[in-house]
Image (cartoon, helix red, strand yellow):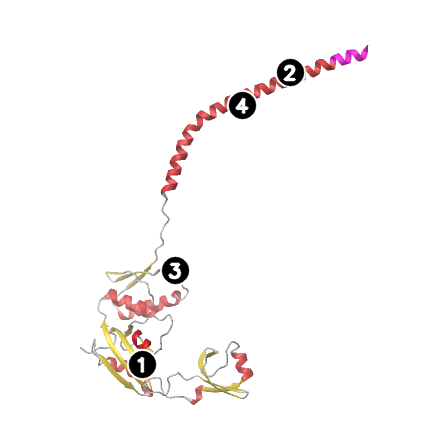
Amino acid sequence: MALKDGDIITLDYEGRTEGVLFDTTLEKVAKKEDAIVENRVYAPITVVVGDGRLVPGLENDLKKAKVGKLTEVKIAPEDAYGPRDTKLIETMSVSKFRRLCPNAKGFVGEEINIEGKVGILANVYGSRIRVDFNPGLAGKELTFKYTVTSTIKKVDEKIKALFNMEYPSDEDFDIGVNKGVASIKLPERTKFDINWFQAKYRVVAAIRKHTDVTDIEFLEHYEGTKPEAKKEEKKKASKKASKKTPKKSKKSNWLLIINSLYFRTALLYSLSFMASNFLRWDKWKKK
């Protein structure tokens, strides 16, 4: 059965130009060509047929493809990244280049960003530098080998695929759909990733566009702390100790009273002794 616009599929591919691999979803192909990209996860990509995210030639060819069948197609520059445009090649002085790209290393082939435009440092001659703002594959014929690995039909699977298309996530997460309301339990990463706040609106737009879901809710879960058993034992021990303390407090109170009486008696005795001695000294002085 032919694919049509709006179908959500998963796709494996390898793309070449002049026999050189420039992109693939297949790890074994990347290893064979010594083209492994560090930290990249090699897996089929999610594609919405007719959504315009692929080059036009590949997008159109997909509609004739069959699930599970390896297909090869050659795409002319006009149906890929377009012809090279000489107006997108800019020559500037070295001083201007250094001012606009202070962190550039200045070697031919370096990818640079000038005022939001991505380009390639194409040539350096004397005090002049040439920067090419054409796409890297502009003007080149492309060859794709691809396989549609699956078509996604179930609503919850569609939502998960669209979510990962707009916000790639290695974490698994739960999705529930009930009476047109989709409940998505967000991956842990979204709690701390500033990129999620922008991707969220793209996720909502994609789900609304490609499913019949009417409402979408995102769920965040934070685990509470559970009381430790040791703390409960300490509380029990402190309760037992508190029950015994009244007996000790009574004894200590009696000791305080006795000590206080002893101190007062000693003080009175000392004062009377001093008074009697003073009277004797006074009588002796008068004589």
Res. 251 visible in picture: yes
The residue identified by callout 3 is: 191
Kindly report which numbered mark, 4 or 3, lies closer to the viewer in this rendering. 4
Q: Amino acid at mark 4?
A: Leu
Comes first in the chain, label 4 or label 3? 3
Comes first in the chain, label 4 or label 1? 1
Residue sitting nearer the eye, 208 or 31: 31
The residues tagged by marks 4 and 1 sit, at their Cα atoms, a distance apart of 94 Å
Few, some or many C-alpha atoms within 10 Å of disc 3 (few <14, some 14-19, many ≥20)? few
The residues tagged by marks 1 and 3 sit, at their Cα atoms, a distance apart of 36 Å
| Residue contact between numbered discs 1 and 2, judged by CB atoms under 8 Å | no
118 w.r.t. 239: above or below: below
The residue identified by callout 2 is: 269
49 w.r.t. 174: above or below: below
Q: Quadrant of residue 186?
A: bottom left
Q: Amino acid at mark 3?
A: Lys
The C terminus - image quarter: top right
- The percent coordinates of residue 24 (x first, y second) are 32, 77
Magenta range: 279-287
Comes first in the chain, label 1 or label 3? 1
Which residue is found at the position 71% from the left and 13% from the top?
276
The residue identified by callout 1 is: 15
Q: Amino acid at mark 1?
A: Gly
Helix, strand or loop at mark 1 = strand
Helix, strand or loop at mark 2 = helix
The disc placed on residue 256 is: 4
Considering every residue shown, the one lying at the far right of the view is: 287
- Image position of 127 (left or right of 38): right
Which residue is found at the position 26% from the left and 79% from the top?
146
Q: Amino acid at mark 2?
A: Tyr
